Image: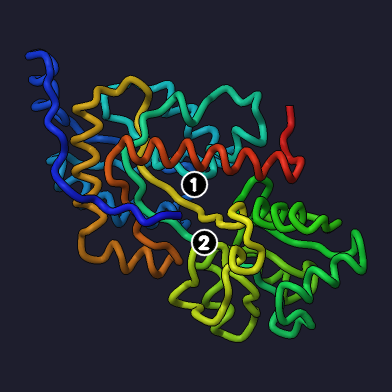
Amino acid sequence: MQRRTFCGSLAALTLPAGLAWAADAYPSRPVRVIVPFAAGGGPDVMMRKIAPGLGEALGQAIVVENKVGAAGVLAAQYVASQPADGYTLLHGAITQLVQKLLQPSLKFDPINDFVPITLTSAAPAVLTVAADSPYKNLDQLVAAAKAAPGKMNYSSGGIGTGAHLAGATLAALYGLQVTHIPLKGSVEIPTSLIRGDTQFAFPTAGTAVPQVKGGKLRALAVTSGKRMTALPDVPTLFELTKDPLTVQESWSGFWAPAKTPPEVIHKVFAAAIKAVRQPGVEEAATNAGNVIEVSESPAAYAAFMRSENAKWAEIVRKAGLATS
């Protein structure tokens, strides 16, 4: 993922008098941010760290609500159906893009039903095995999987998660016959590896790095575009494969319902940029295995989402994962 930083002032907008008044008036009441994941999880913790700064910049309270279900689909459908006035926002993520690609029949469109505002954070995954695993590098893991087709398992926190897609990508690129084991949540991945139920996995950095440094897991590669500061001796999958599809990061950011007025979008954008720069936000991101990522503009975020959608569509196609 290319780094995106806010630079320059927002472009001035020429608006009819009525819209200019509306821009000045927004927000005149609390703004809700819908988080598609459970309270206490990484995305929820990040949003609650960002919320006070966002509220301060907008001059209104920010109400964080968790709407959990269907890997983020229920929250996305809910926000898409809300008035396009800037008072209900989604902390959207790569998850929504992937779920739509996996299940095209879903009744929402993450590209056309929303206006992207800005990225807030991103996190790579780490290809890991148990610390006592015989596999010391990617070549050894691939060779073992090819030598015993169908005998090797990889775990994830559920179907359609980043760990699932990363494992499916590796299998597709190398023609491996491996079995995906979806667990109840990503926190169970290290245990499954240590216990020997699964032989490799792609937990997010926030989950993997402490286990690697604690001597319980071994890192073979990372899915970021460049090596991680926390694991400087671990190569990227792109270094090893030269395939850009292996650059995969779980990212999230602010989305608004389609047709939300551009002046409202730009107000939220400016406030969000200030919010992620508040003291403690970057520390919270680091503790969760994330890196703060912000967009140059809402248009830049929209272009990024379109490029990500195309990339993940190719991954899903290669891996043969799409349903009806």
Disc 1 secondary structure class: loop
Instruction: Look at 18% across and 31% down and name the residue there.
Output: 29
Q: Which amino acid does label 2 sit on?
A: Pro
Image x and y of residue 137, in percent: 71, 78
Task: Give the amino acid at mark 1.
Answer: Phe
- Asked which colour scheme the image uses, the reply is rainbow
Residue 67 in the image: above or below residue 187: above
Q: Which residue lies furthest to the right in this view?
A: 148
Q: Which residue is painted at 10% across and 26% down in the image?
A: 25
Res 105 → quadrant:
top right
Question: Where residue 164 appears, x then y in whole percent?
Answer: 67, 53
Looking at the image, is 312 positioned above or below residue 243? above
From the image, tell me which residue sits under label 2: 124
Looking at the image, is mark 1 or mark 2 earlier in the sequence? Answer: 1
**The N terminus, quarter of image:** bottom left
Is 82 situated left or right of 244 in this image?
left
Q: x, y (%) of residue 14?
A: 11, 21
Q: Are discs 1 and 2 less than 8 Å apart at CB?
A: no
Residue 48 position in % (x across, y down) = 32, 53
Q: Is residue 321 left or right of residue 36?
A: right
In-front residue for pair 246/53: 246
> Which residue matches tag 1?
37
Asked whether, in this view, residue 169 is left or right of residue 89, the answer is right
- Residue drawn 41% across and 52% down? 44
Measure the alpha-carbon separation of dots 1 and 2: 18 Å
Q: Is residue 210 visible?
A: yes
- Label 1 crowd bin: few (<14), some (14–19), many (20+), radius 10 Å: many
Locate residue 16: give its quadrant. Answer: top left
| Circle 2 SS class | strand
Is residue 40 in view from this perspective? no
Mark 2 crowd level (few <14, some 14–19, many ≥20, 10 Å Cα): many
